[in-house]
Amino acid sequence: MPTANSPSPRIAIVGAGLAGLVAAQRLTAAGLSVEVFDKGRGVGGRLSTRRDAHNQLTQRQFDHGAQYFTVESPQFRASVDGWLALGVAAEWTGRIAASDAPGQFTPTAPKTRYVGVPTMSAIAKHLAGGLKVSSGVRIAALDRHAGQWRLTDDAGRTHNGYSTVLVALPAPQAADLLVASPSLANACRTVTMRPCWAAMAALTEPLAVPFDGLFVNHGPLSWIARDNSKPGRPPAEAWVLHASREWSEANLELPADVVAEQLLAAWSDAIGVAPVVESITAHRWRYSGPAEPLAERCLADADRGLFAAGDWCGGPRVEGAYLSGLAAAERIIQSYG
């Protein structure tokens, strides 16, 4: 660890999703110098929210990535309690059901679910506060230069002088960056990331169904949610539809407008009602989640100063990403002795 007479090691984190941001917060708290790079315009990865581009007056918004999160571990519980106290998260008390056949809805067992407020991305924005984050920068390669790691982005710019790099990206993208560590790259390549098509539907009137979230166990869809039922959201009717992984894989390269129309038809079939839709758009998550996560919470090649984290390490979903980022930060801190 750095002392008063030694410069703080510089750490680069590639990826400003939850794993990368949690790691950056922990490392910064430990006195290390951290910079985060992300290809997106903002932070959060799949903690993502899109506003209605077709009708600005309604201020509709769609959590088209992660829909909610649950809490099991004490580490995550402590952070979530902090988010609740700050008002950047709240419990979602929406009615949740499951459907095993068209038009059939069975309420699920009670479970506490949380969302970011007023958007899922609010949590990521909170975590990014005080961090040095370079958005809109896609890191294309890592190499050693003058005894340090050099990052080169896809515009040809170099970012020099890092003793450690944490790659917090989906496993296939992490593998491409971690070629300098065969063990890490090979471990990343063993993980299959599966896609998900998401559709965002603006309705002209409330949909008369007895649920706000529905697990769909038939047809092309896997999940349906009335996003305006979540706390802090505008009241205008806004629904998110997630296709199943199988359907998404089979239709991965379809145009987004075709996907939107097909998922709209599947929605109507699943609930037995034809929604009155003002607009509907689709977004493809090519790397939505791991088919089977690794057993390890993070990957480490401490001798080279290379690490990897994400929801594909140790367990998927929001809590999995959080715990992976935290584990990676602790391994990096340990590597400095």
Image: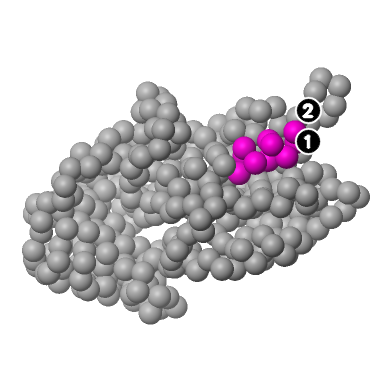
CA gap, disc 2 and disc 1 = 7 Å
Numbered circle sitting on residue 37:
none
Q: Which residue is mark 1?
A: 9
Q: Which residue is mark 2?
A: 2
Q: How many marks?
A: 2
Dot 1: within a 10 Å radius of its alpha carbon, few (fewer than 14), some, or many (20 or more) residues? some
Outermost residue toward the front in this view: 295
For the N terminus, which image quadrant?
top right
State whether residue 195 is above or below residue 164.
below
Q: Quadrant of residue 30?
A: top right
Residue under the point 41% across and 33% down: 74
Q: Amino acid at mark 2?
A: Pro
Residue 114 coordinates in the image, percent (x, y): 31, 39
Q: Earlier in the sequence, mark 2 or mark 1?
A: 2
Q: Is residue 203 visible in this depiction of the protein?
A: no
- In contact (CB < 8 Å): disc 2 and disc 1: yes
The boundaries of the magenta stretch are 328-337
Does 171 appear in magenta? no
Residue under the point 45% across and 63% down: 292
Q: Amino acid at mark 1?
A: Pro
Residue 51 coordinates in the image, percent (x, y): 37, 50
Q: Is residue 32 left or right of residue 6?
A: left
Q: Is residue 32 left or right of residue 125?
A: right
- Element class at badge 1: loop
Residue under the point 78% across and 51% down: 304
Residue 171 coordinates in the image, percent (x, y): 57, 62
- Element class at badge 2: loop
Q: Is residue 41 left or right of residue 118?
A: right
Does 336 appear in magenta? yes
